[in-house]
Amino acid sequence: MSSKDIEMNNSDFFICAAFRQMLLDSDPETEGKLDRATAVSIANYLAQIPPEEQLEPAVMANHITEFCQQPGNERLYEWLGEIYDRLDEDGIDKLVKKTGDPDETADGPPQAERMLYNEGRDICDFLQKWANKNQKPPEKENEQQPKS
């Protein structure tokens, strides 16, 4: 089964949105909730996700949950849950970008699902850009000093 065969649901969207909120609420350079080591760990994990999965909200939701459930990340998992619950309480309509409502026919499921998917993809794009900015560059192996 390819990532294209996995349908995104509201829960996937909220997981991605909650994770984005965690990253936005934390500036590793200041006194945010994420320390620098945790931010680098998250960034390195996100950067290792295969490119074909990076913009798929349903797949990314699974990766996010998997990361937050790893030993040592219990606080991240709790924090993700807190933000998820708050976002879910607000409802999906408040979180999806408003593009205007030309008429009632635009409110049908295909339009709403496409908007939800597009917003989820935008969130995944943000996560990857954040990861690229915050990951630790790989160390060069066997770097040799020039001889004098």
Image: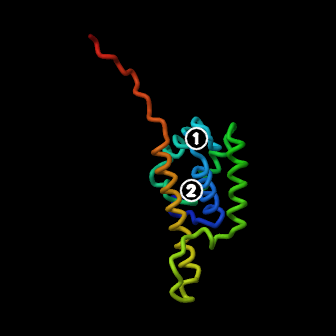
Give the residue drawn at x 54%, y 75%: 98
**88 above or below 102?**
above
> Residue 82: which quarter of the image?
bottom right
Dot 1 or dot 2: first in sequence order is 1
> 25 or 55: nearer the eye?
25
Quarter holding residue 71? top right
- What residue is shown with label 2? 59
Q: How crowded is mark 2: few (under 14 residues within 10 Å), some or many (20 or more)?
A: many
Instruction: Give the secondary structure at mark 1.
Output: loop
Residue, far top = 148
Q: Are marks 1 and 2 in contact (CB under 8 Å)?
A: no
Q: Which mark is residue 97?
A: none
- Judge left or right: residue 5 versus residue 67: left
Residue topped by disc 1:
30
Question: For the residue carrying disc 1, how many other residues have a C-alpha within 10 Å: few (<14), some (14-19), or many (20+)?
Answer: few
The N terminus - image quarter: bottom right
> How far from the left and from the top, in percent, is residue 62?
61, 53
- In-image side of 80 versus 145 (left or right): right
User: Which residue sits furthest left?
Assistant: 148
Residue 146: x, y in percent? 29, 16
Q: Where is residue 114 in the image (x, y as percent from the top left)?
A: 52, 73
Q: What residue type is labelled 1?
A: Thr
Residue type, mark 2 in image? Val
Mark 1 vs mark 2, CA separation in Å: 31 Å
The residue tagged with tag 2: helix, strand or loop? helix
Q: Please determine whether, in this image, residue 103 is positioned above or below residue 57.
A: below
